[in-house]
Structure formats: C-alpha cells, structure tokens
C-alpha cells in the first residue's frame, strides 16, 4: 500500500482552510461542531481528517445527510481530486465507505414518531 503522494504546502493549506470552513457551513445548518473545530486548530486539517475518518460515532455526517448536504462533509472534502494526494489509499477508501454506508442507512429510512392530535 502506498502512502500519500508528495503535494505542495499550498494544497495542504487550502485543505486546512476548508476543514476550518466546515464549522461555518455546519453552523448555517444549525449544528456547531466545536470539537471538530478545536481538533482541526490543534492538529491541522490533514492530520485531523486522517484521524477522524477512522473514528466511529461522529454525528456530523449524519446531520449533513439529513439536510441533503453530504457534499459538505469532511469525507467528501477528502475525496475531492485536488485533495486525494494528501491521503493514503486506506484513508480514501474509509472516507468512501463512510459516505456510502451513511447514504445506505439513510435510504432505508427510519420510522419516526409522528405527533398525533388529541381531541
């Protein structure tokens, strides 16, 4: 398995800036991922993505899917052609699987309690 390819510092800086921008995009949808923002600030965008892509239980992707905005996810950002060289094949595969898995679980639908009127 090969590792990330050599990329310019400018590409890494752009990815970091976009990772920081995720907080603002999420906030527009009513979700403020403070821990994501802090993790990116402390570790840098690329290192944060490399770590977070393997962590289970993040609700950000689910919330984006609920809002129909999967393209705003960290995983989608990692998979953009200009940023793929920053990541290993394994990291990109995991991002792809997370997006596909989350989309599949959403497409199955979930039963939701519907409020009933009392008479």
Image: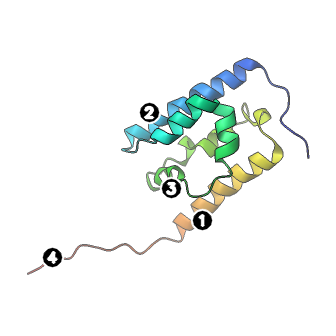
At 61% from the left and 57% from the top, the residue drawn is 56
Whether residue 25 can be seen here: yes
Q: In the rendered structure, find residue 114 and report the number of the disc placed on it.
A: none
At 8% from the left and 81% from the top, the residue drawn is 119
Marks 4 and 1, how far apart at CA: 33 Å
Displayed quadrant of residue 73: top right
Where's residue 108, x and y in %? 53, 71
Q: Quick one: label 4 or label 3, which is nearer the N terminus?
A: 3
At 29% from the left and 73% from the top, the residue drawn is 114
In-front residue for pair 79/10: 10
Are there few (<14), some (14-19), or many (20+) residues within 10 Å of tag 4? Answer: few
Q: In the rendered structure, find residue 24 and report the number of the disc placed on it.
A: 2
Are there few (<14), some (14-19), or many (20+) residues within 10 Å of tag 2? Answer: some
Helix, strand or loop at label 2? It is: helix
At 85% from the left and 32% from the top, the residue drawn is 5
Marks 3 and 1, how far apart at CA: 11 Å
Q: Quick one: label 2 or label 3, which is nearer the N terminus?
A: 2
Q: Which residue is mark 4?
A: 117
Helix, strand or loop at label 4? It is: loop
Q: Which residue is mark 3?
A: 62
Q: Quick one: label 3 or label 1, which is nearer the N terminus?
A: 3
Q: Which residue is mark 1?
A: 104
Marks 4 and 3, how far apart at CA: 29 Å
């Amino acid at each position: 398995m090969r590792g990330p390819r050599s990329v310019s510092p400018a590409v890494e800086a752009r990815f970091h800036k976009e990772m920081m921008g995720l907080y603002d995009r999420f906030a527009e949808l009513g979700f403020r991922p403070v821990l994501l923002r802090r993790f990116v600030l402390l570790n840098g965008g690329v290192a944060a993505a490399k770590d977070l892509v393997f962590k289970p239980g993040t609700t950000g992707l689910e919330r984006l899917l609920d809002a129909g905005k999967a393209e705003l996810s960290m995983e989608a950002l990692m998979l953009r052609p200009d940023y793929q060289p920053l990541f290993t094949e394994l990291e990109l595969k995991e991002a792809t699987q997370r997006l596909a898995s989350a989309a599949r679980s959403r497409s199955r639908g979930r039963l939701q309690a519907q409020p009933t009127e009392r008479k």
